[in-house]
Image (tube, helix red, strand yellow):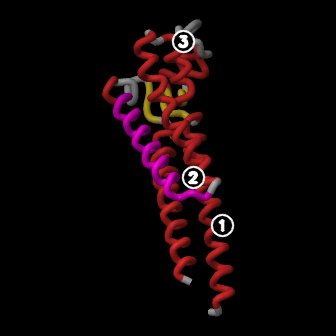
Amino acid sequence: MDEKSEMAGTARANTIVAALTIVMAALLVAAFFLPCASAAADYRAALGELSENPFGLANEELADISLFEYVRIYLNAAPESFAALYVPATVAPAVLGVLTLLFSALRKPVPVIVFSVLAIAMSMLLTWNFEDRGVIPSSSYDWGEARWVYLVAGIAAIAFAAWAIALRRQVRKA
């Protein structure tokens, strides 16, 4: 294989890795809007029969609750001291996902790794918090997709960013 075709292959691989990293970072952002909690079938049916709820959301929105909707609930129904702690903690994975997306678009793999690790850590902290408080899983709710999307997309973004670093080193050696 000649040097020119090897460089073209590396450039193509770099582009593919960058695109995959961007997709994974976009999934970290999207996970904030995916269901974090999914209502059990019997509770889902009961939600349709309720007339009002104190959360500022429609009852149908309470069937599959995303982190975004948890923020709305905390702002509408939680005591101020509770909201002051939990709103920033709940928003943090989305902010870290946006930062991961920004740096993956700029092709900066080290910040992608850092912010992906932080996004995974915050989502795991929220998971522990929900379990510790008995919010999820419970008789009414089980885990939604967001928990797994944060984990898989975060790990994949880290892997692709590490691959991008390896490709850069390969180009420097050539």
Disc nearer the start of the sequence (3/2): 2
Judged from the image, the secondary structure of the residue bearing numbered disc 1 is helix
Residue 87, disc: none
Magenta segment boundaries in residue numbering: 107-130
Name the residue furthest left.
132
Inter-mark Cα distance, 3 to 2:
32 Å
Image vertical order of residue 57 relative to residue 147, above or below: above
Give percent across and percent down for residue 170.
Answer: 53, 77
Give percent across and percent down for residue 151.
Answer: 45, 47
Name the residue furthest bottom.
1
Judged from the image, the secondary structure of the residue bearing numbered disc 3 is helix
Compared across the picture, whether 65 is left or right of 23 comes to left
Image vertical order of residue 55 relative to residue 113, above or below: above
Residue 24, disc: 2
Mark 3 — residue? 76
Judged from the image, the secondary structure of the residue bearing numbered disc 2 is helix
Compared across the picture, whether 65 is left or right of 14 comes to left
Mark 1 — residue? 15
